[in-house]
Amino acid sequence: MKRVLFILSVFALVLSSCGSSNQAGKNQKSAGKAYVIGFYNLENLFDTYHDDGKNDYEYLPDGGNQWTEAKYAKKLQNMARVIAAMKEDNGAWHAVLGVSEVENRHVLDDLVNEPAIADAGYQIVHYDSPDRRGVDCALFYRPEIFKFITSEAIPFTFTPSRIDWSQWTQEEMDAFRTRDVLMVRGTIDGEMFAFFVCHLPSRLGGKGADLRPRGAEIAYMRAMELQKEFPGIKIVVMGDMNDNPGDASMTDFLRGKETIAETTDEDFFDPFLSMIKAGYGSLYYRGEANIFDIVMVNNALAHAQEGTFAIQPIVKDKFYGRVFSKPFMTNQSGQYKGTPFRTFSGGAFIGGYSDHYPTYIVIKK
């Protein structure tokens, strides 16, 4: 009898431990429509060819990374494996997946046609950005779920802004180049949605401190315009923000709030504010956990009208976001144990995945 009770208790513990990672899958299979929406920084998904006007020389066969067709093929397979693993966990492909650090349309086409994810049938929205290295943002979507209407690449500009740019000269501002903010608008089951995909400027130090708040300000201003133009529109802002959820770019300029209760029509609910406080991380620097990969929603998704899509708790029935990590995506030993298993380390190709974990939310009707 004791043996039976022991076995039952172990079985119950296993079910409990699986609950948080499979919650999105439960939402997918329960009554009502549920969809996964997420973001993944693909960490330098470059092909092996030079793009005119771009500083992509290190990702050429004779470049610093000796970026061969074999390495490129391995990178594509790895990125597809992660996307497929999320599908396996959730019971369905992402309806919408934003990506960053992609060189061009060619690499996106190659990725969605990888055998591991080809069945998803992803369509692509992409614009070439003015970034000097040539890395862009893009959006994958499943056309049977998300009905595309329009898209735009929103350029980085210094005005109009509430940031004081007096430390910048006009020449410096004219010479600055970074990624555009991608906006894609369409419908899901008849409800209007807009998805913003960002890759805000890197942490350059010095004058770079105001660039991320400005990038967030650009996305916020356009989102508020869309709310006025399309009352009730549901907006998701996602991306590699190069800032944590508690930084001013996210809390002040994007008005990210930690709880749904405090979110108003002028705010965004940021599920990752509470998650970083709980110790979660989507990337690590000198052993410190950060969440730069943020997905937040406007009030129409946070306080959704009954019978319409709303953001759902998916981790431990408490957190509304998920940082997706699996052992194969993670260093299992050595100096970087427990951190994302990336493509290069110390200048050497190690065949990993990305230096970021993907993040996502679930919406349900």
Image (cartoon, helix red, strand yellow):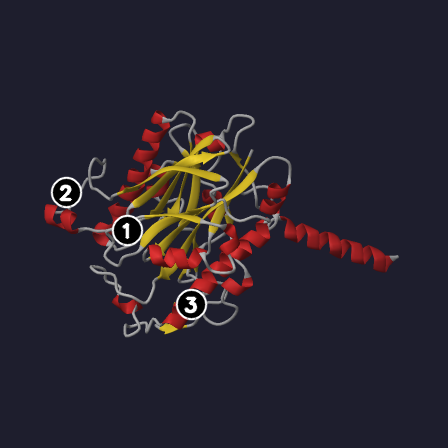
Q: Label 2, secondary structure: give it.
A: loop
Q: Mark 3: which amino acid?
A: Ala
Q: Residue at x 53, y 41 (%)?
A: 35
Q: Tell me how far mark 1 sits from mark 3, CA to CA.
A: 22 Å
State if disc 2 and disc 1 touch (CB < 8 Å): no
Q: Is residue 243 visible?
A: no
State the CA–CA distance, disc 1 to disc 2.
30 Å
Three-letter amino acid code at disc 2?
Ser
Q: Which residue is mark 3?
A: 73
Q: Residue 292 in the image: x percent, y percent?
A: 39, 51
Q: Residue 301, percent across and down?
A: 48, 33
In the picture, the quarter occupied by the N terminus is bottom right
Among numbered discs 2 and 3, the one appearing first in the sequence: 3
Numbered badge on residue 166: 2
Q: Where is residue 12? Give x, y as percent.
A: 73, 52
| Residue ID at (35%, 58%) | 106
Residue of label 1: 128
